[in-house]
Image: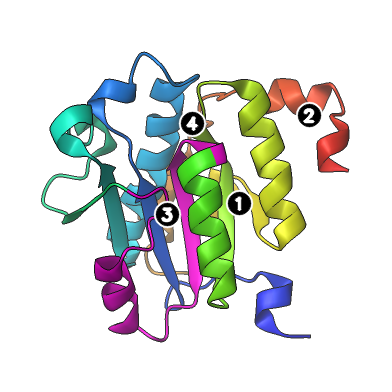
Amino acid sequence: MSLSRLGKLGQHSSVLFLCDMQEKFRHNISFFNQIVSVSARILQTAKILEIPVVITEQYPRGLGLTVPELGADGIKKYTKTCFSMLTPEVEKELQSIPERRSVILCGIETQACIMSTTLDLLEKEFDVHVVADACSSRSQVDRFVALSRVKQSGAFLTTSEGVILQLLQDSAHPKFKEVQKIIKDLAPDSGILALLQNQNPLFT
């Protein structure tokens, strides 16, 4: 069985994608603050583990810049107008790190940019891990159906803590104690718990 089918994550084979967490979306996206907070935990981990990070901004002239609480100051932002994060610039960046074949994907909106990015990455044979508690939309119907859609296409649905622990692999990892501080408190609820409690058939 290939690694892409197993969906294993590794510190040296992964790249983090953070999609369009911008100021103008703050009051329109359900659970926006929680999504940003959860994504910030993964970004902190990526910095500690020296995992490459790709951040996009959708038409920042009209929609504003990446919100400061994400903690992405000093990281390059790729401007786009298309829904997919896989712009020519981003593709060029990925080509410079060919050993990185697993993409960890967070951001908004799930039925638009997250889904388009996932499908484009899968088409190029990347292993895509969509972090369910770090993705949202204006409509929760769109969000939940889009998560089901990307799963049908071959992406792996996961959680922020699941991602972080997979990247570490071992409590003997030299950075474990540093990362452990990030996940000491539970990630904020971004609406996934209610979905699972209702045994939503989209995830069966």
| Magenta-drawn segment | 82-111
Label 1–label 3 contact, CB within 8 A: no
Front tag of 1 and 2: 2
Q: Residue furthest front?
A: 82
Earlier residue among tags 3 and 4:
3
Earlier residue among tags 3 and 2:
3
Q: Residues within 10 Å of mark 3 (few under 14, many from 20)?
A: many
- How far is disc 4 from disc 1 in space, using C-alphas? 14 Å
Front tag of 1 and 3: 3
Earlier residue among tags 1 and 3:
3
Label 3–label 4 contact, CB within 8 A: no
- How far is disc 2 from disc 4 in space, using C-alphas? 21 Å
Percent x, y for residue 185?
Answer: 49, 31
- How far is disc 3 from disc 2 in space, using C-alphas? 28 Å
The residue that label 4 is drawn on is 185
Q: Tag 2's secondary structure? A: helix
Please give the name of the residue rendered at 50% of the width and 47% of the height, measured from the top-left corner: 114
The residue that label 1 is drawn on is 162
Earlier residue among tags 2 and 4:
4
Q: Tag 4's secondary structure? A: loop
Please give the name of the residue rendered at 46% of the width and 69% of the height, measured from the top-left corner: 173
Residue 193 visible? The answer is yes
Q: Tag 1's secondary structure? A: helix
Amino acid type for the residue under numbered disc 3: Ser
Residue 168 visible? The answer is no
The residue that label 2 is drawn on is 196
Tally of marks: 4
Front tag of 4 and 1: 1
Report the front residue among 45 and 104: 104
Amino acid type for the residue under numbered disc 4: Asp
The residue that label 3 is drawn on is 84
Label 4–label 1 contact, CB within 8 A: no
